[in-house]
Amino acid sequence: MEKQNVKELKEMIGSEAQQIIAYADGFESHSAKDEQALTDILSMLKNINAAIVRIEESHQKRLQLSRELARALEEMEMDSKKFAEKHVKKTPT
């Protein structure tokens, strides 16, 4: 289950994105400065998108490293059990 804070953050991101889309859709250009404003907005969005790509790459790397760590710990546990079984004296019953 997703944390409430994460859910709210996702909703806020969606809301902000919708506001930008609505602004761009309704924007009327009457001068070169208006066109430059749209160019500036596009530039900002491209920077945001580049940051998102970097964040996602880092996220995927963390997931991969976590899986590798879990696998290594599992292998160590199995090796430890095998070592214990091999070297622990068995008591006669």
Image (cartoon, helix red, strand yellow):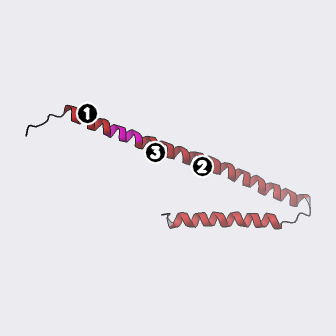
Left or right of residue 26, residue 75 in this image: left
The residue sitting at 77% across, 57% down in the picture is 41
Amino acid type assigned to the residue bearing label 2 in the image: Glu
Q: Main secondary structure of the magenta part?
A: helix
Q: Which quarter of the picture shows residue 71?
A: top left
Pointer 2: residues within 10 angstroms few (<14), some, or many (20+)? few
In the depicted structure, whether residue 1 falls above or below residue 87: below
The residue labelled by disc 1 is 83
State the extent of the magenta-drawn residues as a range: 71-77
The residue labelled by disc 3 is 66
Pointer 1: residues within 10 angstroms few (<14), some, or many (20+)? few
The residue sitting at 70% across, 63% down in the picture is 17
Q: Nearer the viewer, mark 1 or mark 3?
A: 1
Q: Is residue 72 magenta?
A: yes
- Secondary structure under tag 1 reads helix
The residue labelled by disc 2 is 56
Q: Which quarter of the picture shows residue 42?
A: bottom right
Q: Is residue 20 magenta?
A: no
